[in-house]
Image: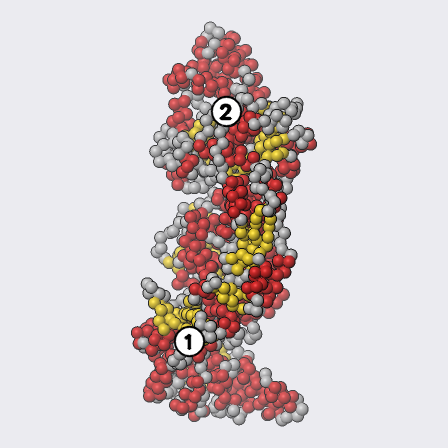
């Protein structure tokens, strides 16, 4: 409201007559509500000048109160309207303006054809003010009218024309003119859209049409599977925060909303991420569902024709099983995703992993505000979708493309009315909309102002639900959002920048050109040529529409393309600085290509860098690596481009300069704020710990600062990364395979530098042998003359470690420290204990002098805040070695805990590690941080996989090992009773060979059952794995295999034992494995085999030895477990060959479960040592056992 109107309003209150008051008030209301544009005010001028102010006021009241319930312009350009009187009486109106003559229409078409920029502006709901002069010159009254030009009628009884109802219609027409100036021509009988003769021109205008949700559907596309390899291309870490910049692209004025809509949307969307941060999620709420989903092969989100979620469905053949209540789908999905352990992700289906990945992408979009609104038409209304800012951000676009290629094509389905897939990019857009809109809506509903939302606009933008908008408002919203979607047509404007290097004319020239994006070589055309050449006439509107938009952000462009000959703008370096840093970034966001000279392509700002060197008076020889602090010197410098310079050199370079500075064929930019910041940092530089310095050298980065390392330090660290082959101990009773030789040498080299090691080789590659070789080397070199080694293992591995040391390093004295009567000895080279004892006897253990500690199955200290982890880390030793077959790279926080044991505090505190590595890598897929992490930890971790080419050549195709277990107390008691009773009974049948043999075979079968599990023999009592030594070992082994996502066959002779294992596995891992036994039909058997071979979630297969020992092809498995041995090598080999056969692409690991000290161990030793006996078992099975004499039988049966 201008000042004169304020004065006039005050005059009203001091005594103006009633008519004058009404005239002022009515005029102000009309100009405020209905004449918002210059052409709208001009068109309403005759009405404002009408002398019947009372009728005008009444008509305005009708219009203001929404009494005009219908208004259309039909094909004959007649306005048809319906006005609802205050008494609820409906009145019909018809209005028609005198049409332009054919001659005048052609004149206008010629004018607009000659001025395509005017035409393009018209189709963007803008009217160039120059048209007013043309209208007056041609006397066509397009922008105004005489009352005599109208033919109008109303069904009311008032004889005056216009009546109050017609006045209301005229005002609403004026409002429509504001929104769509094409109506000005349409009322005069000229439909410009219909008169565009050229099809491409028409398409360029109609390109602003609103897409329908249904149009994204693809009915007959073939399903595309999940592409796991594409995951390596994901990186969500480099998204800059765009809160203000994105909305900056939108016009300030909106004709469809009262107020500053940009500010409202910026505030609301910002609150969405705050809402996300404040949420706490109950990990137990969906624990059972997580286990279920690990076994669910296919998932799909299904939306309806209004873009509302129907449910998340588990797909089981032809059935769709909903997972949630229909009103809680998205909120429950959020809880589901937020409570998953990152390391467990590979256990889920491809569909779940894809959904989770898109969700993490959305959270990063939410955090950085990298999303945009898009208007779509649904089945019944209009909907604002919030989608990734791919249209204006190349980084976002690349990630959307990667996700489109990565995700299965049936992740999101549209029910419209039949189920349809969406185009790959639209699938990602629509999935992102669901999550983004969920958080925006949730944050909005919590705000106190939600109840006052404007249902027509704010509700549409913030509710995530379809909204009933008029076509006019929908088109206005579409036009308002258009800047987000520029530069996507075949021809698009580009800006070319040329540097002028002559000293007197130094500066930059900007030229507008046009790019043909579909041509093979991206043809570039001068703008004048493009506009004057009839070859491109069909595309003029497209380019000019975009230039019209660009002028709002870069006003200098207008002078170039509005018919002037010179299409170039020149700027001095000072002038260009503002263009380069303020305007060009906006144009890039608008999808406008910028062609820069080479000198500007790598423009950088000076920043701080760190130079790491050696102190002059220190030698690099003979230094312990972790004492390197005394050797290194750290100096902070200034990085300019690729150079690192001293502060004085930097200041000399900048003396008297500011802004864009040319330095060695390239530009750098510096302002006073940058300079002040750099000088302040140089005065009080960041403090780097010795561990941070080591990481900086290894990864060549330090918290984003550039790192330069001098040659002497590089040489020292090269030695750290290298591993010269060390001769194995002379007394080692084994031949190390080449990769084992490397691992042993690597650990030895680290130990010489007082560094710990994490050996994380795949299962079956012989980590224990490599560590035993190292311990034996320590003994040979005298380290155990005064000190000892402590090996901490799970209880189930105590015996195995003792046996392996006796077998491979008999000169290495070792003892176990375990049991009620345990005693420590300083005489043993190696003491083997358990994690539990290490926690209980921590003070006692710390009284001994340890040179080395070793922890096997290091995942036992993965949880940093447990007493067990604290105890292990508290044991003081010179060298710490961790062993783990678990792929720790999938569980970074667990990795931190293990590495903190190996080299204390090397990776900083857990909080520092989470901030620097864990969250960026696991949540943002930060590839740069992942690479820095790998480089920083590479010297201290060695992980080889069986699938590695260099490893697989060293391995046999099949690796067999005896997997020993100890009897549990209850097993020992039952076992001994059976032996005692049977030996007593045998004395009665010395002369009855048949009865004696039968009794012995029954005895053997009973003892085997006891070794399997007491319940199998007793048929009563506890049924858990903890009551059986084999059961415990089985669960531990399966847990390690499951982490690797590898498949396992478990063979047993007993159906009851198979049922027990079925229950254990379901309780421990949350899924029920398949079980093939003699009671299964041929059809069931075939289905199980097919599922195991082809479904990656079917990872464990229990098989009866008789039912599945022959004839099956199960090459998907690379682990074979013989839970109970047949004592017939041929039968055992046949079972193993279900996996180890043609088609097997991996090495097969075979585990033969044997209970130590029992007949299982003794009979197996007999068979393995005597070839004749082995041949006998092939011919006779177990019958030969019945023929053993009493003495041999008793020696075989008694527990040793």
Q: Which residue is drawn at 54% across and 70% down?
A: 262
Indicate the secondary structure of the residue bearing disc 1. Answer: strand
Q: Where's the N terminus, which quadrant?
A: bottom right
Residue 732 versus residue 562 in the image, above or below: above
Residue 696 visible, this orientation: yes
Residue 1129 x, y percent position in the rendering: 41, 22
Q: Which residue corresponds to mark 2?
A: 730
- In the rendered view, would you say 363 is above or below 913? below
Identify the residue at horizontal 35%, vertical 30% (top origin).
Answer: 1111
- Give the residue drawn at x 63%, y 88%: 7
Residue at the disc numbered 1: 568
Q: In which quarter of the image is residue 1114?
A: top left
Viewer-proximal residue among 1131 and 166: 1131
The residues bearing labels 2 and 1 have C-alpha atoms spaced at a distance of 82 Å
Mark 2: few/some/many CA within 10 Å (<14, 14-19, 20+): few
Rendering quarter of residue 973: top right
């Amino acid at each position: 409201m201008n000042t004169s109107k304020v004065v006039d309003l005050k005059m009203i209150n001091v005594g103006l007559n009633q008519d004058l008051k009404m005239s002022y008030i009515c005029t102000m209301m009309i100009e405020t509500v209905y004449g918002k544009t210059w052409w709208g005010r001009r068109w309403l001028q005759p009405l404002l000048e009408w002398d019947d102010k009372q009728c005008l006021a009444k008509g305005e009241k009708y219009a203001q109160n929404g009494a005009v319930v219908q208004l259309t312009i039909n094909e004959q350009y007649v306005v048809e309207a319906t006005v609802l009187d205050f008494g609820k009486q409906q009145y019909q109106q018809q209005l028609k303006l005198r049409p332009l003559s054919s001659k005048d229409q052609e004149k206008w078409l010629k004018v607009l054809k000659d001025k395509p920029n005017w035409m393009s502006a018209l189709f963007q709901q803008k009217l160039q003010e120059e048209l007013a002069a043309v209208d007056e010159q041609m006397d066509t009254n397009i922008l105004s009218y005489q009352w005599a030009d109208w033919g109008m009628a109303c069904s009311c009884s008032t004889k005056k024309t216009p009546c109050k109802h017609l006045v209301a219609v005229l005002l609403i027409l004026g409002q429509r003119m504001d929104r769509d100036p094409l109506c000005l021509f349409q009322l005069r009988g000229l439909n410009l859209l219909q008169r565009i003769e050229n099809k491409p021109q028409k398409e360029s205008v109609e390109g602003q049409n609103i897409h329908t949700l249904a149009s994204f559907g693809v009915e007959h596309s073939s399903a595309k599977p999940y592409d796991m390899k594409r995951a390596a291309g994901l990186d969500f870490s480099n998204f800059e925060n765009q809160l203000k910049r994105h909305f900056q692209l939108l016009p300030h004025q909106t004709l469809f909303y009262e107020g500053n809509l940009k500010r409202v949307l910026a505030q609301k969307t910002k609150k969405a991420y705050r809402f996300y941060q404040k949420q706490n999620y109950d990990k137990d709420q969906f624990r059972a569902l997580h286990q279920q989903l690990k076994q669910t092969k296919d998932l799909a989100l299904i939306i309806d024709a209004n873009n509302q979620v129907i449910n998340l469905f588990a797909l089981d053949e032809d059935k769709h099983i909903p997972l949630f209540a229909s009103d809680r789908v998205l909120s429950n999905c959020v809880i589901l995703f937020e409570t998953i352990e990152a390391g467990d992700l590979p256990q889920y289906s491809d569909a779940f992993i894809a959904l989770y990945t898109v969700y993490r992408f959305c959270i990063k979009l939410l955090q950085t505000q990298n999303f945009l609104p898009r208007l779509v038409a649904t089945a019944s209304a209009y909907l604002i979708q919030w989608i990734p800012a791919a249209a204006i951000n190349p980084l976002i676009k690349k990630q959307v493309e990667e996700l489109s290629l990565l995700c299965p094509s049936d992740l999101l389905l549209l029910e419209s009315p039949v189920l349809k897939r969406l185009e790959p990019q639209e699938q990602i857009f629509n999935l992102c909309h669901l999550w983004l809109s969920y958080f925006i809506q949730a944050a909005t509903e919590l705000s106190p102002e939600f109840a006052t939302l404007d249902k027509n606009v704010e509700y549409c933008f913030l509710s995530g639900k379809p909204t009933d908008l008029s076509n006019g408002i929908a088109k206005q919203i579409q036009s308002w959002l258009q800047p987000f979607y520029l530069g996507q047509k075949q021809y698009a404007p580009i800006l070319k920048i040329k540097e002028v290097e002559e000293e007197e004319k130094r500066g930059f020239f900007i030229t507008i050109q046009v790019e043909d994006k579909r041509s093979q070589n991206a043809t570039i055309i001068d703008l004048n040529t493009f506009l004057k050449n009839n070859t491109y006439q069909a595309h003029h509107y497209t380019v000019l529409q975009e230039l019209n938009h660009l002028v709002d952000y870069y006003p200098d462009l207008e002078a170039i393309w509005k018919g002037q000959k010179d299409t170039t703008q020149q700027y001095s370096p000072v002038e260009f600085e503002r263009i380069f840093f303020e305007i060009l970034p906006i144009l890039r966001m608008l999808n406008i290509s910028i062609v820069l000279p080479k000198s500007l392509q790598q423009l950088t700002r000076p920043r701080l860098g760190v130079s790491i060197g050696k102190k002059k008076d220190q030698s690099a020889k003979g230094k312990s690596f972790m004492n390197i602090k005394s050797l290194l010197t750290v100096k902070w410098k200034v990085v300019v481009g690729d150079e690192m310079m001293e502060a004085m050199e930097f200041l000399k370079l900048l003396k008297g300069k500011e802004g864009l500075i040319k330095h060695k064929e390239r530009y750098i930019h510096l302002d006073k704020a940058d300079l002040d910041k750099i000088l302040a940092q140089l005065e009080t530089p960041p403090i780097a710990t010795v561990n941070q310095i080591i990481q900086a050298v290894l990864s060549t980065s330090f918290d984003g600062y550039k790192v330069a390392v001098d040659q002497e330090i590089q040489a020292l660290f090269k030695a750290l990364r290298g591993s010269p082959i060390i001769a194995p101990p002379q007394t080692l009773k084994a031949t190390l395979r080449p990769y084992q030789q490397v691992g042993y040498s690597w650990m030895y080299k680290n130990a010489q530098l007082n560094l710990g090691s994490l050996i994380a080789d795949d299962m079956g590659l012989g980590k224990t042998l490599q560590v035993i070789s190292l311990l034996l080397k320590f003994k040979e070199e005298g380290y155990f003359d005064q000190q000892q080694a402590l090996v901490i293992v799970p209880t189930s591995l105590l015996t195995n470690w003792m046996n392996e040391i006796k077998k491979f390093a008999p000169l290495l004295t070792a003892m176990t420290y375990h049991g009620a009567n345990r005693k420590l000895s300083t005489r043993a080279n190696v003491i083997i204990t358990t994690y539990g004892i290490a926690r209980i006897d921590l003070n006692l253990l710390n009284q001994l002098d340890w040179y080395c500690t070793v922890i096997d199955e290091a995942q036992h200290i993965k949880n940093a805040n447990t007493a067990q982890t604290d105890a292990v880390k508290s044991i003081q030793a010179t060298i710490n070695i961790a062993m783990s077959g678990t792929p720790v790279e999938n569980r970074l926080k667990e990795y931190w805990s293990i590495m903190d044991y190996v080299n204390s505090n090397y990776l900083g505190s857990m909080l520092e590690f989470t901030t620097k590595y864990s969250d960026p890598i696991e949540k943002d897929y930060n590839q740069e941080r992942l690479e820095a992490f790998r480089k920083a930890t590479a010297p201290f971790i060695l992980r080889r996989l069986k699938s590695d080419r260099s490893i697989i050549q060293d391995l046999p195709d099949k690796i067999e090992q005896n997997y020993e277990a100890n009897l549990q107390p209850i097993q020992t008691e039952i076992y001994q009773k059976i032996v005692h009773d049977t030996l007593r009974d045998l004395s009665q049948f010395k002369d009855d060979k048949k009865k004696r043999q039968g009794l012995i075979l029954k005895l053997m079968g009973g003892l085997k059952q006891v070794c399997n599990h007491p319940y199998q023999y007793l048929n009563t009592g506890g049924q858990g794995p903890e009551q059986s030594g084999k059961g415990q070992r089985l669960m531990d082994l399966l847990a390690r295999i499951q982490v690797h996502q590898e498949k396992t066959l478990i063979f047993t002779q007993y159906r009851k034992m198979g049922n027990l294992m079925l229950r254990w596995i379901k309780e421990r891992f949350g899924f029920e494995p398949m079980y093939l036994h003699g009671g299964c039909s041929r059809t069931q058997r075939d289905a199980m085999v097919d599922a195991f071979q082809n479904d990656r979630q079917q990872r464990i297969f229990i098989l009866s030895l008789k039912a599945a020992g022959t004839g099956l092809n199960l090459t998907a498995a690379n682990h074979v477990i013989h839970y109970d041995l047949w004592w017939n090598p041929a039968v055992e080999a046949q079972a193993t060959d279900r996996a180890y056969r043609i088609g097997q692409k991996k090495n097969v690991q075979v585990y033969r479960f044997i209970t130590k000290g029992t007949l299982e161990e003794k009979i197996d030793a007999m068979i393995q040592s005597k070839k004749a006996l082995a041949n006998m078992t092939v011919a006779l099975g177990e019958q030969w056992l019945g023929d053993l004499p009493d003495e041999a039988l008793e020696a075989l049966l008694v527990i040793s």
